[in-house]
Image (tube, rainbow, N blue to C red):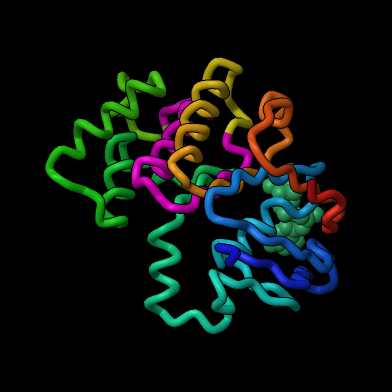
């Protein structure tokens, strides 16, 4: 059984812009899906449908076999608990510190525990930004903010990771560091859905490449 299924999914933004056209896709537990395609192809829209920030105009999505439109509040919160999302525009709290931004994510996921401070610093070290822990997010560079957004999503150890262009602002060394973390994550059986046009990512044989163009699935290798 697929973990997430998209069945004849279309998304029209009012009044009549077709962002996604009749998409059929099955995502299985343990998949590493690389969603690619030019700017405006519909990658972010497809991810938003998966994490239920947007609703399809027609068609249906399924979590396991349950239609999204019929998910009970409890099942929906279960789905959300199991998701880690790296947003294309980070969505951090600019007035809070790096440390606080990450801590909030752990608290919300109910994974904050006594030694969480150590865990947070471990990740900050790994991403080479521990010296920024007590800085407000608004004082960080774009790439540093991107790193915080990534840590916030993966530190809670989600079953499904959604990553929207997670490396757009990073240098090749940082990109490779993140890829190695994502690979390990995937090896543990976690499911990853990553949208990118980064050649460094596309040239590695990470998983299944899904190509979008003008809202259509052109290739599903
Ligand atoms: N809320 C919205 N209202 C109207 N149109 C939208 C909205 N969100 C996205 N679009 C349009 O839908 C199309 C697909 O947008 P989307 O953000 O999914 O593209 P993308 O593939 O993620 O692009 P990028 O690589 O630049 O991130 C774009 O043409 C965009 O203008
Ligand atoms: Mg996008």
Residue situated in front as seen by the camera: 65 or 142: 65
Residue 52 makes an appearance in the image: yes
Give how far across and how far down residue 87 sits, in percent.
54, 47
Left or right: residue 138 versus residue 164 is left
Which residue, as the protein is rendered here, is positioned at the far top? 173
Q: Is residue 147 above or below residue 79?
A: above
Residue 94 makes an appearance in the image: no
Residue situated in front as seen by the camera: 202 or 198: 202
Left or right: residue 146 versus residue 168 is left
Quarter of the image where the N terminus is located: bottom right
Give how far across and how far down residue 98 sits, in percent.
33, 34
Q: Is residue 47 above or below residue 171?
A: below
Look at the image and say whether residue 14 sits in the magenta stretch. Answer: no
Q: Residue at x 59, y 31 (%)?
A: 167
Look at the image and say whether residue 157 sits in the magenta stretch. Answer: yes
Give how far across and how far down residue 206 sits, in percent.
64, 34
Q: Residue at x 56, y 65 (%)?
A: 53
Which residue, as the protein is rendered here, is positioned at the far left? 114
Q: Residue at x 15, y 38 (%)?
A: 115
The quadrant where residue 51 appears: bottom right
Left or right: residue 10 versus residue 164 is right
Give how far across and how far down residue 40 sits, in percent.
79, 49
């Amino acid at each position: 059984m697929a973990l997430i299924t998209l069945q004849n999914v279309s998304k029209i933004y009012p009044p009549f812009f077709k962002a996604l056209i009749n998409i059929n896709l099955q995502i299985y537990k343990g998949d590493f899906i690389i969603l690619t395609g030019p700017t405006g192809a519909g990658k972010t829209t497809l991810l938003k449908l998966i994490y239920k920030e947007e609703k399809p105009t027609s068609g249906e999505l399924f979590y396991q076999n349950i239609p999204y439109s019929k998910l009970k509040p409890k099942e929906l919160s279960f789905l959300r608990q199991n998701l880690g999302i790296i947003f294309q525009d980070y969505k951090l709290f600019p007035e809070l510190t790096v440390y606080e931004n990450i801590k909030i994510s752990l608290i919300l996921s109910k994974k904050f525990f006594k030694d969480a401070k150590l865990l947070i610093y471990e990740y900050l070290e790994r991403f080479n930004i521990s010296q920024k822990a007590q800085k407000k997010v608004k004082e960080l560079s774009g790439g540093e903010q991107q790193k915080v957004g990534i840590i916030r999503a993966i530190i809670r150890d989600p079953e499904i990771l959604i990553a929207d262009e997670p490396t757009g602002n990073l240098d090749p060394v940082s990109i490779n560091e993140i890829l190695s973390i994502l690979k390990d994550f995937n090896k543990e059986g976690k499911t990853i859905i990553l949208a990118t046009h980064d050649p460094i990512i596309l040239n590695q044989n990470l998983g299944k490449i899904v190509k979008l163009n003008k809202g259509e699935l052109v290739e599903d290798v």
